[in-house]
Image (cartoon, rainbow, N blue to C red):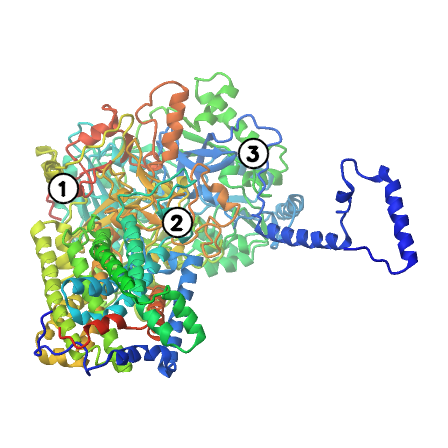
Amino acid sequence: MKDYWKSIDEKNLRIVETKQKEIEPEFSIVGLSSEDVKLRSTRRDFLKICGYTAVSAAILSSCETPVRKAIPYLIQPEEITPGIANYYASTYFDGNDYCSILVKTREGRPIKIEGNELSGISRGGTMPKIQASVLNLYDTARYTDPLIDKAKTSWEQIDSDIKKELNNISTKEGNLIILASTVISPSTKQLFGDFKEKYPGTEIIYYDAVSSSAILSANKLSFDRAVIPEYKFDQAQLIVGFNADFLGTWIMPVEFTKQYSQRRDLTNGETSISRHIQFESIMSLTGSNADERYAIKPSEEAILLLNLYNALAVKINSPTYKVKASSLDVSQLAEELWENKGKSLVVSGTNSIPVQVIVNAINSLLNNYENTIHINHAVLVKQAHDKDVLDVVKRMNDGDVDGLIFYNTNPLYDFPDVENFKNGLSQVGLTISLAETADETSDACKYVCPDNNFLESWNDAEPKEGYFSLAQPAINKLYNTRCAQDSFLSWIDSDSDYYSYIQNYWKENLFNKQDKYPVFRTFWNHCLQNGVLELKEESQAHPDFKLDVTTYFDELVKSHSKATHEGLELIIYETIAIGNGKHANNPWLQELPDAISKVTWDNYVAVSPKYAKAQGIENEDVVIINDQIELPVIVQVGQPEGTIAIAMGYGRTVAGRVAKNIGQNSFGFTEFVDDLRQYSVTNIQLTKTKKTYPLALTQSHHSMEGRGLIREATLSDYLKNPSSGNEEHEKAEEEAVTLYKKPDYKGHHWALAIDLNKCSGCGNCVLACQVENNVAVIGKEEVRNRRIMHWIRIDRYFEGEEDRPAVVHQPVMCQHCDNAPCENVCPVAATSHSDEGLNQMTYNRCIGTRYCMNNCPYRVRRFNWYDYSDSKNFEYNLNNDVEKMALNPDVTVRSRGIVEKCTFCLQRIQEKKLNAKKENRTLKDGEIKTACAQTCPSNAIVFGDLNDKNSQVSKLFKDPRSYHLLEALHTLSSVAYLTKIRNKKNLTV
Amino acid sequence: MYKTKIRGVLIKGNKSYRQITDDIIRPIEGKTPRWWYIAMTISTLALAMGIWAIYITISQGIGRWGLNNSVAWGWGIINFVWWIGIGHAGTAFSIFLLILRQKWRTSINRAAEAMTVFAVICAGVFPLLHMGRVWLAFFIFPYPNTRGPLWVNFNSPLFWDVVAISTYLMASATFWYIGMIPDFATIRDKTKSRIKKALYGFFSLGWIGNARSWLRFETTALILGGLTAPLVIAVHSIVSMDFATSVMAGWHTTVFPPYFVIGAIFSGFAMVLTLMIIVRRIYKFQDYVTDSHLNAIAKILVFISLIMGTAYSTEIFIAWYSGSEGEIYTFFHNRITGSHTKAFWTMVSCNAIIPQLFWFKKIRSSIAMVFIISIIINIGMWFERYVIIVTSLTKDYMPSNWATYKPTIVEVGTYLGTIGIFCLGVLLFLRYIPMMAMSELKAINKETS
């Protein structure tokens, strides 16, 4: 375009400008032509670029994923190697259950509890509550700070306030009570003594929600020792249990399961197993394992025992007593017991002194003391006398108590007459709770001095005389809490902390009882490393049973005839998972199916099938019990007619988000009779309603439909033919004809063998697997939709008559079939077979067609129906940063829409393989243990390499009792089951 | 061809070629009727329901369906198989009846092929939506990729499904479209609307109707027909293999491929019958789709129904004969008796017993009865898939895992949604595409069968 000018001036101006440009070359940028210079930005360009930048910044920033900071160690701690787990020996005791444990920590976080194999008590076993306890550490319902009247305060403030009040009580010579569940820590006991010295009016009162008070008293009467004796189920040839769920909840279930399963082992050439007869009023785990089980009403137990006593007394010409004949004839039982004199064991879980005295008398007649029962090795996990707490309540109501410190106890939840307790408490001036997590009692206390979690604190324990163990912190305190013992120490103005206090105690009291370590330091380090110290007690003479049982006989006969037998009898029992309700806020425990009923997330009224039929009640119908509580019904086979049972531990009102308002509190039904707490009561009225309440069951069909899933034989048949009951296996082996080559594994061939004769069905493997493999908790609604995520489940079937059912348990996990039906149907090859015989799942590949789930005949594959982590619909343990700290970093957290299943703990196999490789050696048999195998308290699960001909698993695979599930389908499963052998005789009772 | 007066003419009313053209084009050229708008609204509502259900499924998860760990497939797969079955009508009509020289098919095959295309589209929705991670659905296609490369599992019947169904959809759609070219050209030439002229002109691909074009057209149709014929058998055989290759009792059955193909044709023909009875009445096409057409289809149905009955009894016999406890349980205690009895006996009576009424000429010639039975057959075929999938999964090998299955509103919504898609497709087809092959009709005008 031509350059037109408008005026002369303008023309001249342009000339000037052009000239100026020509004479200012020094301002031009070197290398740019004048043409380039013309490209200078204008205001318009600026705005354009601005706009562009703003828009793209906005778009880009909106796409950004949230930043998650991983803060590295500033100074690398010496003992922590990222990716390598550290194990610390410690002790679990919650006032109820004891276990010596190993705490697995990763990057400084406890993530798993294993049993400590060095312990002579728990011998590497655990129980579900113990497995799940690691989540209690990260529980968001824990107290984070000390509270005065529910307002956060500092430790200095709360200590000075409390000390002032304690001194006030001291000066006016008032009464101070420390109410605690049984304390087994010798140091703590000594500390209580020190506390008493400083504040003289102090009394220590033990209160156990699940009490063994009668056993203590009966032994006091019988042997002058108010203790629970040591029971040796492994020494007993014949075990007779009366309402004692010793494999599930009674006293020391871990130890008892270890002992019991030891005598059910037929794999090492053994030809005899113990025989177990159970009389019980609920369908318990123990009863389900018994060779013979008889359902009795609680009121029938005493008469049975009396008759049994008489039948035995006749044998040695002891005096017999007049008693009504029992509903069951015990003469044959007495014969059998007599045959097993000195190697039998009679136990009763009933909290009644006369009953326990008679049991002692029977054991004494049978010469069982010093053989299967040792009164000199007292078990200390239950020390509370029921009378004591009753006194406290009475004194509180009389205004006789000035201060009350609650340690590890929750009476405002589990006391029978909570209102009475509450009234009393309102008259107490000083109330202090040392609770770790908010509970009903701490909620009513003025001062809350939150205790550490056991994984954050030092402690020691003496669960059984001569058996000591130490607890050490595995993580620094998460919150501003303080170990309860440190609180006591600071209130007595001690300048020592609890750690040095324990050390001192051990130095003074235990160090001198051993001679292996001359220096305390090495002794202490050794104990700390092992977690346990087991002293050899010098054997003392066993006291004789010299008690005259006449009065107890009369008492029992009288009370039996007095008892009204109208209405129903109600039994309040403990479940394996929830127990007394202390850990009800643990979602893992809530979702663990009950071993018998397979109900999760609720308690319920168990009624007998006959009663249900007569009343027209069905599962899930809501009934009202004594106008007190409304609960749904489960028709439970094996429940004696005329009785109903309700589990305790539910219906917590002050608890975390998980436990709150789940089920109903049944502690209110328990009552004190003759100063003893009774867990079975008579005269119960059951009223039907028209309502129904949904229950979440993980198994709804209870018959095996005659399929050979669980195979069993009697001991006598087994001795005649070891493969008895396993005929199908031979047939399947014969018929297994295939055109395809059998898979050949060059290196390892992993396999699992499960001895159904040892498995008690406790469900510990289910929980261990859940913890190890980050298995999601999905909540009641989803369990009810039959979508539970557990990688291992315990199938439970009933057979026989409804009132006398035989029960079988079978753990089922992925069978890692060598000819896996799931593998060939996946369109995207997300599930494949490894060259070590593992059926693998590649989560990244899975698109969720669920074809594999349909084609798995064992139904062990699990689908992520929703996003279970970070979802507001699944507020359990995967949706907040604190609780997620319990996740195992070696295992992927699965996302929505993919299938998952048991991996045989691939991460453990890999770890141990690498270790062996680093050390340039071959793997040892038994070195790798899957979580389920490691944790099994009855050692029923064995993992190993089939290519190693000498491995335990290879031997078990060749056992005549071994078979595979659904072997006719020719899936070539890598899991073998060993038939169940019942020691059945045709006893007519 | 052999001609006789006994059988009657194929097209009644002694029509001229022009009359035929006018008749067939009338729905396209005429004013849109009111019922069409109403039907469109209802279909769109159903579709909206489906879109809601799909949104819920994708945004929240398959958890919103009634499935569980034991019953991992439910309505989704039932409806998938059901739609695929319906989708067999078109090709069966076009190919099998062509091979069997059944000339009466000409007035029906276009609509049947349209149904095929829409039904297969509906069917395709389910396997896709059924995936846990639908956003990764492309994993199922075998193409060189940057993911390793990871390859698909050629052993999986689900992968065969993908191949078979996509091939079938493409082949049927092409076949359908090519058959329409001369008719599009006719409309192009006849219509007065410029838009229509342009559109039909575009789709008629410049058809001028000269002898060479006809020659090529017929050759192409023949080749495509020949190619598609085996597909009809392949598709449903492969769908049946989803079940037949598995180990589940009640699924693991060698009779499945022929049984499924026959079943599919059965449901397809029934659906054609349902649809044609409505269409001929609304558009007054009784001269083209004559009573003898319906009669002929009814005769085919009674024959297939016998095969269905045979298949059912074979299955039951083999279950007993195998001696396998799982099979015996599934068939005798969970289908014939047990908790799924209703579904089983609905299936048997709808598919094997009620269609036997077609033996009676009186019933065959009663349009109302034919209509009702055609619907009953489609219900029966739905129940057949229900019985196969749900009974086998709810009570499998492990009694501990026996569970129940109930669909949720989301699953029902998805099903309604696909019905919406189907109806929408059919309505658009009726309005914008000549629903009978004019050129072919002209070829058989005044002919007897």
Q: Which residue is mark 1?
A: A984
Q: CA distance from mark 3 to mark 2?
A: 62 Å
Q: From this viewpoint, which residue is outermost toward the front? A: B211
* Mark closer to the chain start, 1 or 3: 3
Q: Position of residue A395 (x, y in %)?
A: 50, 54
Q: Is disc 3 surrounded by few (<14), some (14 to 19) or many (20+) residues within 10 Å?
A: many
Mark 1 vs mark 3, CA separation in Å:
53 Å
- SS for tag 1? loop
Tell us which disc is closer to us: 3 or 2.
Answer: 2
Nearer to me, B307 or A986: B307
On the same chain, marks 2 and 1? The answer is no
Residue B405, image x, y percentages = 28, 60
Is residue A105 rendered to the left or right of residue A218? right
Give the camera-side residue of B438 and A852. Answer: B438
**Residue pictured at 43% horizontal, 17% vertical:** A516
Task: Say which residue appears at 17% left-offset and 31% top-offset.
Answer: A959
Which residue is the site of mark 3?
Answer: A498
Residue depicted at 29% across the width and 57% down the height: B171
Q: CA distance from mark 2 to mark 1?
A: 59 Å
Secondary element under disc 3, as helix, strand or loop, is helix
Q: Chain of mark 1?
A: A
Q: In the rendered structure, the residue with mark 3 lies on which chain?
A: A
The amino acid type, in three-letter code, at marker 2 is Phe
- Give residue B292's mark: none
Mark 1: few, some, or many residues within 10 Å (few <14, many ≥20)? some
